[in-house]
Amino acid sequence: MSDEQTFTRRCATHDVSTGDRARMAEMESNFRSRTRIAEADLSVTIPVAFVHIVDGDMGSITQAQRTEQMEVMNKAFEPMRISFRHDENEVVEINNPDFFTMGHGSLNERNCKSQHQVISPQKGLNFYTANPGGGLLGWATFPHEMAGDPDMDGVVMKFGTLPGGDTSPYNLGLTAVHEVGHWLGLYHTFQDGCFGNGDEVVDTPSHAGPNFGKPEDAGQPWNACNPSEACPIHNYMNYVDDDWMNEFTQGQIDRAWAQIGMFRRDLLVSTSRGAVTPGMVPDLGEEIAW
Ligand SMILES: [Zn+2]
């Protein structure tokens, strides 16, 4: 029997409330003017630990898939001067049918992450694979949430989204790029639609809702709020097909660095795992409490 199923990209990363986004925008603005972190030209390597939840034979991920996933992430984040590395000694496979189908925000998710976190969330990324169901491809936690709830930090990915997986057209590893974008503090480009401050990034035109598939850029505004602007139809933080995603904007890069400086600054400290920042890290001041 054919197991054909059509997927539409769905990400379960929760919306940050309007009030919290406004507060965040003010904090970020203050932090950036004080530290000039976006201008500091820093680079960083982030250690990644893979936690593969399986149900018997289902959900296994090969070393080749991990390697390819890291290559996809490294290519996407290169303009951000962020790279990722993983150590095969920090790969675990957990056979647990309940955790395998964990839903976003479920008790199974909390139990799974509490019991199987591999790397300290201050020092790296816990990358979980599972089969959440409901058409969800993945989700992430935001940087400002880590201090208050470190157990939950990380990204959860439907296992078929990794390169070579079975969730075509979302099986080239770009879901991980999208979710790691959230993990570094980015919102969807269609955040708030045509209302409010959108994704808090000035160079991603606001648009009414997600774009799907492979919208061709024939000068159409698609669902851009301002018809003279073009939708960010190739942006990693939109909902287009994997092979249509190829862009972070300068505004997104600057925002991610501010978020690292505010809430993930331990990534900037050299460790034996190679999270090294060449050059001068500006004085980041006191720990930012969310
Ligand atoms: Zn998302």
Image: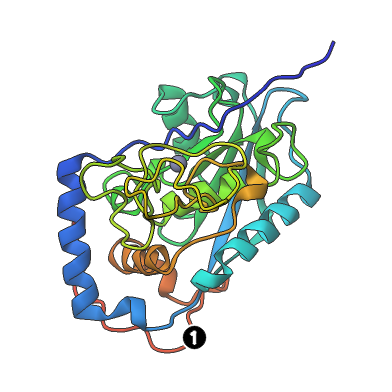
Count of numbered labels shown in the rendering: 1
Reading the image, the residue beneath label 1 is 278
Q: Nearer the viewer, residue 226 or 99?
A: 226
Quick check: can you spot residue 290? no
The quadrant in which the C terminus is found is bottom left
The answer to whether residue 251 of the structure is visible from this angle is yes
| Residue 246 position in % (x across, y down) | 59, 57
Residue 99 vertical placement versus 211 (above, below): above
Find out if the beta carbon at label 1 lies less than 8 Å from the nearest ligand 1 atom: no
| Mark 1 secondary-structure assignment | loop
Instruction: Identify the residue at image location x=40%, y=59%.
Output: 122
The x and y percentages for residue 77 are: 55, 64
Instruction: Tell me the quadrant of ligand 1.
Output: top left
Residue placed at 49% from the left, 61% from the top?
248
Image quarter (top left, top right, bottom left or bottom right) of the N terminus: top right
- Which of the two residues, 125 or 226, is positioned nearer the viewer here? 226
Q: How is the image coloured?
A: rainbow
Residue in the picture at 31% in, 40% down:
193
Asked which quadrant contains residue 130, the reply is: top right
Q: Splitting the image into 4 quarters, where does residue 16 fall?
A: top left
Name the amino acid, label 1: Pro
In x, y percent, where is residue 242? 64, 45
Q: Residues within 10 Å of mark 1 (few under 14, many from 20)?
A: few
Q: Nearer the viewer, residue 249 or 108?
A: 249
Relative to 147, is 44 above or below? below
